[in-house]
Image (spheres, rainbow, N blue to C red):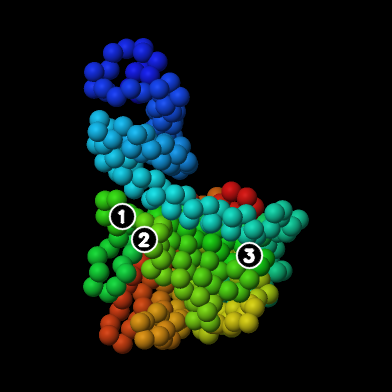
């Protein structure tokens, strides 16, 4: 309206103040920026805030110059500014994760090497049976993995189940993963999470609205926990059982102990199988975060369902339980919805 009035393109009775042509050009700029921001938002582009932020600033400056007639525009600007701040925080968090992923894992894959029977026979018989059951024998070694997940989680034993979706990237030659999620805990309230294990070190970062950190775990207990998580998750890429950073010891006909050493951390867990050779559980002693300090507790992953992805049979449904003295705390129900192998840059 300011542009139209300044250039006398139409009669604008709602505006009685005189608006110069230079100021009218600024009104037009604001309109163009808001239209651009709206278009990007409709197209679900996370950079929409880059157009909206200068639009709000310039709009509010024009409101001040025409305060008596335009002051109610401040309400709209404040609402839009709130959206801009939240979208910036979301974009900033995602940009951080993208930069971490760009530096994560190999840029190119090594020459393909098949998982041949002579390599597999160096493992305990129960682990050999698992690899055959998983259909990885005769296929290429897995070097990198990209998988998508959905499920539910609890943040405390008596809490409500919160649905989530996540994506994870794994490297196998140098063991590590980056996991990211976005959780809508209530309307307009989201939690952004990133868990990472890289170069033998772990870090869990969780932010409400992408702004307020509620967890930024790191240190020896986190390193041990993320190493064990990495070890347990080879159920999704079983050929990693052949890596030299994992040592196997058969316990009985249906179980084997795996000890993983990487960096300065060593930890062990027990893989249990059924008579068909399917993995049914993984259990270990893992640090459990408490306000008074982390304690070493029994940690159990139970496989609930099996499925083939690109010819590889994996336990795609699982539950994770802390076996605490106060009782079992099943905090995670997880399903792998897709998994890709050996795509170094997804």
Which of the 4 image quadrants contains residue 104?
A: bottom right
Q: Which residue is mark 3?
A: 172
- Return the disc, 2 or 3, that comes first in the chain's sequence: 3
Q: Which residue is mark 1?
A: 189
Picture residue at 45% right of the left edge, 39% below the top: 54
Residue located farthest toward the right when viewing the structure as drawn: 111
Q: Secondary structure at mark 3?
A: loop
* Cα distance in 3D space between marks 2 and 3: 31 Å
Q: Secondary structure at mark 2?
A: strand
* Cα distance in 3D space between marks 3 and 1: 35 Å
Q: Secondary structure at mark 1?
A: strand
* Cα distance in 3D space between marks 2 and 1: 7 Å
The answer to the question of whether label 2 and label 1 lie on touching residues, with beta carbons closer than 8 A, is yes
Picture residue at 32% right of the left edge, 69% below the top: 155
Q: Position of residue 270 (x, y in %)?
A: 49, 80
Badge 3 crowding class, 10 Å Cα cut-off, few under 14, some 14 to 19, many 20 or more, is many
Q: Which residue is mark 2?
A: 208
The answer to the question of whether label 2 and label 3 lie on touching residues, with beta carbons closer than 8 A, is no
């Amino acid at each position: 309206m300011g542009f139209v009035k300044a250039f006398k393109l139409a009669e604008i009775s709602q505006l009685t103040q005189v608006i110069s042509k230079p100021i009218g050009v600024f009104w037009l700029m604001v309109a163009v920026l808001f239209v651009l921001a709206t278009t990007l938002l409709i197209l679900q582009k996370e950079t929409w805030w880059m157009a909206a932020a200068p639009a709000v600033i310039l709009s509010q400056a024009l409101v001040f110059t025409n305060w008596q007639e335009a002051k109610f525009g401040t309400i709209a600007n404040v609402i839009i500014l709130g959206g801009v701040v939240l979208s910036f925080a979301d974009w900033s968090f995602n940009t951080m994760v993208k930069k971490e992923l760009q530096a994560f894992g190999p840029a190119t894959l090594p020459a393909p090497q098949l998982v041949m029977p002579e390599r597999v026979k160096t493992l305990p018989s129960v682990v050999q049976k698992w690899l055959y059951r998983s259909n990885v024998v005769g296929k290429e070694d897995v070097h990198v993995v990209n998988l998508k997940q959905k499920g539910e989680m609890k943040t405390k034993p008596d809490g409500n189940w919160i649905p989530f979706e996540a994506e994870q990237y794994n490297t196998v030659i140098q063991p590590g993963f980056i996991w990211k999620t976005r959780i809508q805990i209530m309307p307009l309230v989201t939690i952004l999470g990133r868990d990472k294990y890289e170069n033998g070190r772990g870090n869990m970062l969780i932010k409400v609205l992408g702004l307020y950190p509620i967890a930024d775990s790191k240190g020896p207990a986190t390193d041990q926990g993320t190493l064990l998580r990495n070890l347990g998750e080879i159920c999704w890429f079983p050929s990693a059982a052949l890596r030299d950073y994992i040592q196997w010891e058969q316990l009985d006909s249906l179980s084997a102990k795996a000890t993983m050493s990487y960096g300065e951390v060593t930890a062990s867990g027990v893989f249990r199988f059924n008579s068909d050779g399917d993995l049914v559980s993984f259990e270990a002693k893992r640090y459990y975060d408490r306000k008074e300090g982390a304690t070493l507790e029994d940690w159990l992953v139970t496989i609930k369902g099996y499925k083939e992805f690109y010819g590889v049979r994996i336990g795609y449904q699982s539950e994770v339980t802390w076996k605490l003295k106060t009782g079992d705390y099943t905090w995670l129900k997880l399903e792998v919805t897709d998994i890709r192998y050996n795509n170094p840059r997804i």
